[in-house]
Image: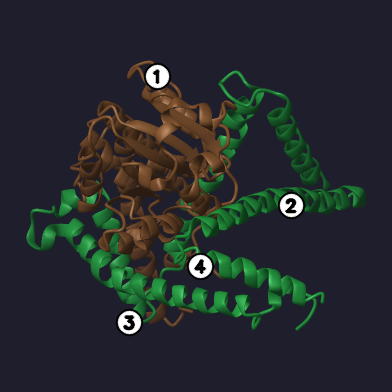
Chain colours: A green, B brown
Amino acid sequence: MKRAVPWLLTFVAGALMINDFFVPHRTHAAITQELQQWGLIVVAFTYVLGMANVFDLHFKKIRRGSSEALYSIVLVGSMLGMAALGIFHDHQGEQSPFIWLYNTVYDPLSATMFALLAFFITSAAYRAFRARSTEAVLLLSAAILVMLGQVPVGAAIWGPDSFLGGFPGLKDWIMDVPNLAGKRAILMGAALGAISTGIRVILGLERAHLGGGK
Amino acid sequence: MTARRSWRERLEFIDRRWLFLILAFAIVLPLVVDLPLPLYVSPMVQDLYDAIEDLPDGSTVLISADYDPSGKPELEPFHLALIHQLAEKKIKMVMYSLWPAATPITEAVLAEAGLTTDYGYRKDVDYVLLGYKEGQQIAMRSIQKSLKGTFPVNRDGTPSNEIPLLQHYDTYTDFAMLINVSAGSPGVKEYVQNVQSITGVPMVAACTAVSGPDYVPYYKAGQLLGLAAGMKGAAEYEKLVGRPGLAMAGMSAQSASHMLLIAFIVFGNVMYFLARRSGGAR
């Protein structure tokens, strides 16, 4: 019973959503619309679950007084503070404390974290991108051509009006032919895999998502 | 006493903070010293611009802005130029986001573009900001059934049924075009798979440079009418719109950083082969 009911729910919901692509009937559309609304509500509840999990994890760290407790205090404090400002204050306009914190704390911190990638890539370019094999040489050559074709300095060195379209032309060819072929193969393979997994879940052949067993 | 390292070993195992410092200079210097470089417009961005230009003046488009501050340097310049191109054609806009941190960015972009102050757009009449909706692909599919059902109120709390602009627009196919500005998932891939391929709504997109190669198949298949990838795509689009902005200004910095990375790759490999010849390479 513990496994049959969840499987039945999965089957009904999954079959309805698949049929939605093929059945244009108004009643069927109304049912799937209602199911999607339930889905949106369930997703919203996962935020509550996520918050409870974060609280549980970080309160444990704070209670233990571990070396990471300070970070946990900052995390929990920030989360509660932003939530309170968003709920109890106006969250629109430059004057709102919520937007002020967003603009002055969240925005620059988030951009900084992403910008650090450039430095790690630089270090990796110097130390790790080695032409150890034929495949690595091909990969490096393609990477260098795309990098040159991607920026204006590449066009300044060997322009699009030159032989083979210059660096931009070579970049476009790499993106449009070998890259496209590889990406299409990956997309189709992933789509077929997703379809087969979906069918297995709906038919109850794949039950790992129900938990509690092998 | 440790053996004295050769110059090759010292270069191979150079403290990476020197590399970081050189990169910082390579990025900052071109931002300070203006380096005029030719900007080649790729067919994908030209097609994106043309697709929007071909829209009838006064039509209405749906814009899903799905990015956060980490994607701003690449996507915000495009977003800003997009608002200018649409506003110059008097195209009405219905905007929302499936990313929680995107709505404040959209508000800032609208203010910077001067949508209400310079172009005279009226809120809820010429443009609507619906705000954020959780649910990712479920939300996308739900909008296909009913935009007003998915967003019962707009960003200000006004009921969607009372918004003048939404009186005749409720699903993707009611709009002249779907425009997605996306830094990841949910974004272009999900919109093509869940919306465009089912409804056939004309769609264009802007994405981060790292996602660009993933979405080229959709452009080549005609599912995307145009695509602007990364800061380069945004710079090309700024050039076409005639609004040089942060993306065009960043092109010389990006050029310098790419050249530096190539130099590091070549130099690192020269060190590697020298070490291999002397029997020290791993």
Three-letter code, disc 4: Asn
Q: Position of residue B175 (x, y in %)?
A: 35, 41
Q: Residues within 10 Å of mark 2 (few under 14, many from 20)?
A: few
For label 4, the crowd category at 10 Å Cα-Cα, with few meaning under 14, some 14 to 19 and many 20 or more, is some
Q: Which mark is residue A134?
A: 3
Which residue lies under the disc numbered 2? A50
B90 and A159: which is toward the camera:
B90
Q: Can you tell which of label 1 and label 2 is closer to the viewer? A: 1
Residue that label 4 marks: A19
- The reply to whether residue A66 is in sight is no
Q: Is residue B269 visible?
A: yes
Badges 2 and 3, same chain: yes
**Tag on residue B116?**
1
Helix, strand or loop for disc 2: helix
Question: Which of pointers 2 and 3 indicates the residue nearer the eye?
Answer: 2
Q: Chain of mark 3?
A: A
| Amino acid at pointer 3 | Thr
Counting from the top left corner in percent of width and height, residue A208 is at: 70, 77
